[in-house]
Image: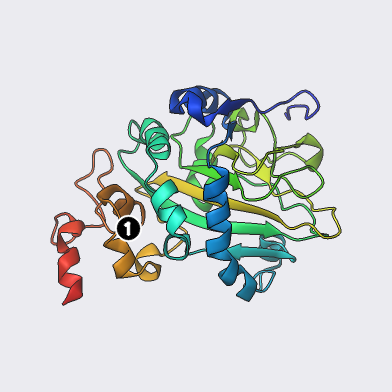
Amino acid sequence: MATNAKTGKVREVKAREGYEAALKIIREDAAVIIKELMSPDQIRRINEEIQPSMDQMGVGSKVPDDWLKDFHGYNTKRLTGLTTISKTFREDFLDSDFVHQLCEKIFLEDSGTYWLNSAQVIEIGPGSKAQPLHRDQWQYPVFTHCGPSAPEAAINFIIALTEFTDENGATRVIPGSHKWDDFNQNGTEEDTIPIEMNVGDACFLTGKIVHCGGSNRTKDFKRRALSVVIQASYLTPEEAHPFLVKKKIVDTLSPRAQRMVGFRSQFPKQSPGVWKCDYGEMGDALHAWDE
């Protein structure tokens, strides 16, 4: 069933080659490393913008379920609400032409529109064990039953805010797992390979591929990533963005960035639209919220 981790390899492209180079590989492999997706200056600014919030956070899960505690990580911090917290994220990523070009090619044919599922900083602390193996589309169980030929439910940009190494907890994937007949199977840790990256590189995954955060075997290094999941617009996002993003921030966003965080209506294919106001575009009602 599983691809041998010793022979599997995730291919790389450089962001400056354009979105089509990444799209070709993601269509075939469900995973690609995009080199230099974000510049050193962009990464520096994101890290500076999020640091006060990260300093205030405790580690571990906020839920009582044991499996979710393992999934969230006992010595891991997970910061959400990035649209409000980071000006660089909302201006340089959420409204990125490169990102939207990829999203349009992946989602428009199947689902019509797309929006932001979640954007979170994941900081894996020293001594952390590997996260349970999973597929991002697990949030929507019907896709597990649909198998490899189903439309894409979600895609994930995992951007290295620090160096990613095998030792410090780099994301791990099972090459070829997006083609398995039974998506209830998730392989073993021995099937995985690490995605080692420089700061600013991104591991771009579809929701079908099995992956996990790796174990951090260092004594003092905190591996930090920005994970941005984007999904088909007929699915409910993980983050309740309209309740979390401040109106004064929304007013600064472009219409397509507003749609990403739930302040515009969605029009999936063969649908009269969802997330509407008086059966029309909810964006037209934004001005009324100031009253």
> Which residue occupies 78% across, 57% down?
221
Q: Position of residue 164 (x, y in %)?
A: 71, 44
Q: Position of residue 65 (x, y in %)?
A: 66, 69
**Which residue type does callout 1 highlight?**
Gly
Residue 245 higher or lower than 145, as above or below: below
Q: Position of residue 72 (x, y in %)?
A: 66, 61
User: Can residue 138 be spotted in the picture?
Assistant: no
User: Can residue 42 be spotted in the picture?
Assistant: yes
> Which residue occupies 53% across, 56% down?
46
- Residue 88 figure quarter: bottom left
Mark 1 highlights which residue?
Answer: 262
Residue 80 higher or lower than 4, as above or below: below
In-image side of 18 versus 196 (left or right): left
In-image side of 281 versus 100 (left or right): left
In the rendered image, which quarter contains the C terminus?
A: bottom left
**Nearer the observer, 90 or 186:** 90
In-image side of 280 versus 254 (left or right): left
In-image side of 271 versus 175 (left or right): left
